[in-house]
Amino acid sequence: MKKDSRAQITRKESWREYFLLSLESPAIAQNAQPGQFLMVRASVDTHPLLRRPFSIFSAEGKSVEIFFQKVGLGTRLLSEKQEGDTIDIIGPLGRGFTVKKEIRGKHSALIGGGRGIAPLYFLSQKLKAHGGTARVFYGGKSVEDLPVRERFEKSGTTLSCTTEDGSFGTRGQITEAFEAELNNGFTVSRIYACGPELMLKKIAEIAAALNVPAELSLESVMGCGFGACWGCVKRIRKGQEPGWHKICEEGPVLKAEDIIWELGNND
Ligand SMILES: Cc1cc2nc3c(=O)[nH]c(=O)nc-3n(C[C@H](O)[C@H](O)[C@H](O)COP(=O)(O)OP(=O)(O)OC[C@H]3O[C@@H](n4cnc5c(N)ncnc54)[C@H](O)[C@@H]3O)c2cc1C
Ligand code: FES
């Protein structure tokens, strides 16, 4: 974990409420793994005081990228930053996705709902580098929620898009599109996903029914990002035992079977 108080924004892209920032931060970029995150200071003022967590969208050479949706004050302040500005970041943090040697020749499904696509570009590149293949399922309410689809297409990744209003790709929920593909004979040996918790819960159920390992990236409100504040605890299984654990240290990526769904009744 490194602190870089002067990570320079070298490129900014924006689409209505979504933003992609490239940050020059060599020490963080060199150590980053897909699924890990940064804690970003949105303002030099004391408000908002707490850093905000963002998945690492990519890490290459000296640069890391973050992709975020503007939802409140912190993300609004970040969205107003310009190329040449510097921001204060800490990272890489947390446990990311596991990409083992056995992935060579195997096919994975990467499922990202809305801003949940953020850690999956980096993962798709890493899987490819390890000789695996990936198909990315990218879903949102409308086409405006799928701004980074071209980035996947340019990298040659197979992409299936879904929108709830039918404005792009298949109409419906991303999990329905994934299930439909499975029913059409699509096979996977591993599932990775990030997005709203209801979506993740459904994916955990699909993975269990298929008996395929799944890793899911969870969100949690975070104060520090590195184990000091207990702001991020959730009930998960560690070993076989359920207990309250810090998501910033045990996660944010967890095995599907280790997650205790507060919204569901499988607890
Ligand atoms: C490990 C991790 C990785 C993340 N990666 C990304 C990413 O790559 N891109 C991205 O757009 N967002 C990501 N998030 C969510 C992001 O951190 C929040 O959207 C952000 O902190 C909101 O800050 P804000 O000041 O703009 O909003 P606030 O003013 O703090 O809150 C605005 C609204 O967002 C909700 N909110 C705030 N924090 C969270 C949270 N952590 N999870 C769910 N809802 C929240 C609040 O309840 C409120 O409704 C991630 C969260 C975690 C824990
Ligand atoms: S965010 Fe502070 S302990 Fe996890």
Image (cartoon, rainbow, N blue to C red):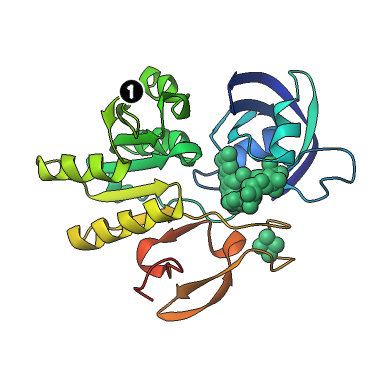
On whether ligand 1 comes within 8 Å of the CB at mark 1, the answer is no
Residue 184 seen anywhere in this rendered image of the structure: yes
Residue at 86% of width from left, 45% of height from top?
47
Name the kind of residue labelled 1 in the image: Phe
x, y (%) of residue 8?
Answer: 76, 26
Q: Quadrant of residue 158?
A: top left
Residue 53 seen anywhere in this rendered image of the structure: no
Left or right, 195 with reference to 111: right
x, y (%) of residue 201?
Answer: 36, 59
Residue at 32% of width from left, 36% of height from top?
137
x, y (%) of residue 164?
Answer: 34, 35
Determine the secondary structure under disc 1: loop
Give the camera-side residue of 29 and 37: 37
Disc 1: which residue: 168
Residue at 74% of width from left, 66% of height from top?
229
x, y (%) of residue 56?
Answer: 57, 39
Give the answer, above or below, for where 56 lies relative to 211.
above
Left or right, 112 with reference to 188: right
Left or right, 172 with reference to 25: left
Q: Quadrant of residue 104?
A: top left
Give the answer, above or below, for where 116 lies relative to 223.
above
Q: Residues within 10 Å of mark 1 (few under 14, many from 20)?
A: some
In the picture, which quadrant includes the C terminus? bottom left
Left or right, 251 with reference to 199: right
Q: Quadrant of residue 54?
A: top right
Give the camera-side residue of 106 and 262: 262
